[in-house]
């Protein structure tokens, strides 16, 4: 892992120069019958597409896809070998590898998508928030909506002796960190974790708790939670059921943020390197198909995902966010063409800087209980994210005529350029994690 990506690609160039007509002939996979897990969310799409369009079989892989009850069960089943790999929260491989929760070395050669989440509140909360949100010339709320509009509602609840509760899908989920980021950017403390108290609710203005994604709408409708952060189609489901209003998407919190990854145990990748490459190739092809020709295949993808064996939600609900639009209030449909991105903007490349962002949020909220030097963040990222494997798979696809070389970041050092495209305008540079942690008003500091 200490080699630079450029050095790895230089070595690969020599290998490719002597390659036969098709790389598929060389990939003698070590295991060809595989079972992969997923949660019923639209961002599992690359798995469904790779299966339905035969991309796994093209690589000599015979795959079974199994929906899982929740993220913990999914992770545990990958660790104990019941699943060979799975659609995972980006924070899961990182947390497991550093020993937060279950300890296991989990890695990823493939990032599954960008964006795809939203934050929804109940109708009661929305009615109270609306007075604090400016309107445009058409009388519609001005977006993006800051959590500062929620702060007076939370204060009202406190004055009445009521707790304000919100759901997120898992303690190390992107949803937890995005919800926390949005709340803190609006002046609300989402609470801290400690070694002794893993609730994440220490000093919290808003109490966050875990709710499985498909249960979010019904849990809010029952009054157990006042809002939630979840992936699609469960924000749009609240709109269709008339029980809540999505107030912001994660695209508006952090433009083109990384979302899910495909996770495998380190041991699996070491024992089955060709199989790992074959899996990565099939998933890259699926991601290309999902985004090609300006999302021309999305309607077909929606039909696939609506099937009971995948997401199992109405096609209209899935299409509401997956085909370039997003509905906030009933009838308030807005163009967000990049709400779901599967390949554009190097969405599938496992950038170290993406991993480091999640680690900084774990430190910010106390899941990493001790200060760590910048070097630690870089080392953890390099032990979990596998850009070399990704680029090797990509080069195979290019050689086979199944991908365009111009679509891959061959010269990357694994870090995206610094960006301030967050709702609060705070700049993030993956090369300097501790400086980033120290830049927030709310949250633990590097020391």
Image (cartoon, rainbow, N blue to C red):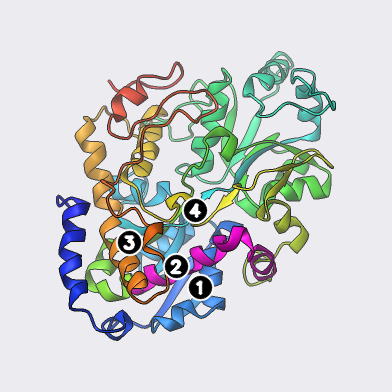
Q: Where is residue 48 drawn, in percent x and y?
A: 56, 70
Crowd class of label 2 (few under 14; some 14 to 19; many from 20; radius 10 Å): many
Magenta-span inclusion, residue 244:
no
**Mark 2 and mark 1 residues within 8 Å of each other at the beta carbon:** yes
The residue that appears at 49% across and 48% down in the rendered structure is 259
Magenta-span inclusion, residue 290:
yes
Residue 321 is left or right of residue 252, and the answer is: right
Q: In terms of sequence position, does the residue under pointer 2 or pointer 4 come before the other?
A: 2
Residue under label 1? 50
Residue stretch rendered in magenta on the structure = 278-304
The residue that appears at 32% across and 74% down in the rendered structure is 399
Q: Nearer the viewer, residue 379 or 338?
A: 338
- Dominant secondary-structure state across the stretch colored magenta: helix
Crowd class of label 3 (few under 14; some 14 to 19; many from 20; radius 10 Å): many
- Determine the CA span between mark 1 and mark 3: 16 Å
- Determine the CA span between mark 2 and mark 1: 6 Å
- Determine the CA span between mark 1 and mark 4: 17 Å
Q: Nearer the viewer, mark 3 or mark 4?
A: 4
Q: Quadrant where the C terminus lies? A: top left
Helix or strand or loop: what does disc 3 sit on? helix
Helix or strand or loop: what does disc 1 sit on? helix
Q: Where is residue 434 drawn, in percent x and y?
A: 29, 26
Residue under label 3? 390
Residue under label 4? 344
Q: Is residue 408 above or below residue 170?
A: below
- Determine the CA span between mark 3 and mark 4: 15 Å
Residue 160 is left or right of residue 27, and the answer is: right
Which mark is on residue 283?
2
Residue 441 is left or right of residue 41, and the answer is: left
**Mark 1 and mark 3 residues within 8 Å of each other at the beta carbon:** no
Q: Is residue 151 above or below residue 348?
A: above
């Amino acid at each position: 892992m200490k080699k630079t990506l450029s050095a790895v690609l230089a070595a690969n160039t020599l290998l490719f120069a002597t390659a036969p007509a098709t790389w598929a002939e060389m990939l003698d996979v070590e295991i060809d019958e595989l079972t992969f897990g997923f949660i019923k969310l639209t961002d599992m799409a690359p798995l469904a597409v790779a299966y339905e369009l035969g991309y796994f079989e093209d690589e000599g892989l015979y795959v079974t896809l199994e929906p899982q009850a929740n993220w913990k069960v999914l992770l545990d089943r990958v660790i104990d070998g019941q699943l060979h790999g799975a659609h995972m929260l980006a924070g899961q491989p990182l947390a497991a590898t550093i020993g937060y929760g279950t300890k296991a070395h989990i890695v990823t050669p493939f990032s599954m998508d960008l964006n795809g989440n939203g934050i929804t509140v109940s109708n009661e909360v929305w009615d109270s928030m609306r007075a604090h949100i400016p309107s445009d010339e058409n009388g519609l709320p001005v977006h993006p909506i800051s959590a500062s509009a929620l702060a007076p509602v939370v204060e009202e609840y406190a004055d009445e002796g009521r707790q304000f509760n919100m759901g997120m899908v898992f303690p190390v989920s992107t949803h937890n960190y995005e919800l926390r980021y949005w709340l803190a950017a609006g002046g609300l403390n989402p609470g801290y974790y400690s070694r002794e108290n893993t609730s994440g609710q220490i000093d919290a203005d808003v109490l966050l708790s875990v709710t499985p994604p498909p249960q979010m709408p019904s849990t809010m409708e029952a009054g157990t939670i006042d809002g939630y952060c979840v992936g699609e189609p469960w924000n749009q489901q609240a709109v269709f059921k008339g029980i809540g209003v999505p107030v912001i998407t994660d695209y508006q919190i952090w433009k083109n943020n990384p979302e899910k990854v495909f996770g495998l145990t380190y041991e699996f990748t070491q024992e089955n390197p060709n199989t790992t490459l074959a899996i990565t190739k099939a998933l890259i092809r699926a991601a290309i198909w999902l985004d090609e020709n300006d999302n021309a295949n999305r309607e077909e993808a929606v039909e696939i995902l609506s099937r009971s064996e995948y997401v199992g939600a109405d096609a209209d609900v899935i299409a509401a966010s997956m085909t370039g639009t997003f509905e906030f209030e009933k009838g308030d449909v807005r163009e967000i063409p990049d709400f779901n991105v599967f390949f554009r903007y190097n969405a599938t490349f496992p950038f170290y800087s993406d991993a480091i962002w999640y680690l900084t949020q774990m430190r910010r909220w106390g899941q990493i209980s001790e200060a760590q030097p910048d070097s630690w963040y870089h080392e953890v990222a390099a032990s979990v994210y596998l850009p070399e494997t990704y680029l090797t798979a990509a080069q195979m696809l290019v050689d086979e005529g199944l991908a365009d070389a111009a679509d891959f970041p061959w010269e990357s050092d694994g870090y995206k350029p610094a960006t301030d495209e967050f709702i609060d305008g705070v700049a993030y540079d993956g090369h300097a994690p501790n400086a980033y942690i120290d830049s927030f008003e709310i949250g633990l500091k590097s020391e």
